[in-house]
């Protein structure tokens, strides 16, 4: 499996892109990327989900690999919700 991206660098780049784009464009891009990811995931053969692969110096299943990305997305959803809650109370 490919090594995951540098999370800090990816976040920095994503934040910069989002600051220079409209909220609507950012949301549309997010939806499009996740839709394509769902399509790709749905095309993965069932037997590959629990097969262990080397990733750097550790062994991980495809399920665990993608679960890490899910957790990262959830972290950002929490950040967005906090910002929206603060704006609602202003």
Image (tube, rainbow, N blue to C red):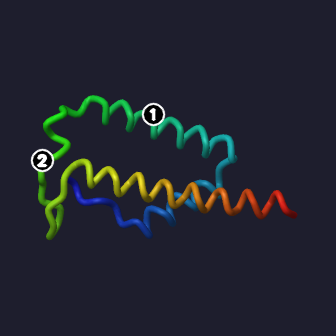
What percent of the width, then of the height, locates residue 82?
A: 68, 62
Could you tell whether 8 is left or right of 29 in the image? left
Name the residue beneath numbered marker 1.
35
Earlier-in-chain disc, 1 versus 2: 1
33 up-or-down from 10: above or below: above
- Mark 2 Cα shell of 10 Å, populated few (<14), some (14-19), many (≥20): few
Residue located at (84% from left, 62% from top): 89
Could you tell whether 53 is left or right of 33 in the image? left
What percent of the width, then of the height, locates residue 53?
A: 12, 54
71 up-or-down from 33: above or below: below
Residue located at (15% from left, 67% from top): 58
Name the residue beneath numbered marker 2.
51
On the rendered image, what quadrant is the C terminus found in?
Answer: bottom right
Q: Secondary structure at mark 2?
A: loop
Could you tell whether 71 is left or right of 29 in the image? left
11 up-or-down from 46: above or below: below
Q: Nearer the viewer, mark 1 or mark 2?
A: 2
Q: Toward which corner of the image does residue 39 lie, by quadrant?
A: top left
What is the C-alpha distance between the residues marked 1 and 2?
Answer: 24 Å
73 up-or-down from 32: above or below: below
What percent of the width, then of the height, locates residue 42?
A: 31, 30
- Mark 1 Cα shell of 10 Å, populated few (<14), some (14-19), many (≥20): few
Residue located at (32% from left, 50% from top): 66
């Amino acid at each position: 499996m490919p090594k995951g991206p540098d999370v800090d660098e990816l976040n920095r780049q994503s934040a910069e892109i989002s600051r220079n784009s409209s909220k609507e464009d950012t949301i549309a891009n997010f939806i499009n990327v996740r839709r394509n990811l769902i399509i790709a995931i749905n095309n993965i053969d069932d037997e590959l989900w629990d097969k262990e692969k080397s990733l750097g110096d550790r062994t991980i299943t495809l399920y665990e690999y993608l679960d890490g990305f899910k957790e990262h997305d959830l972290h950002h959803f929490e950040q967005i919700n906090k910002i929206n809650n603060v704006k609602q109370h202003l």
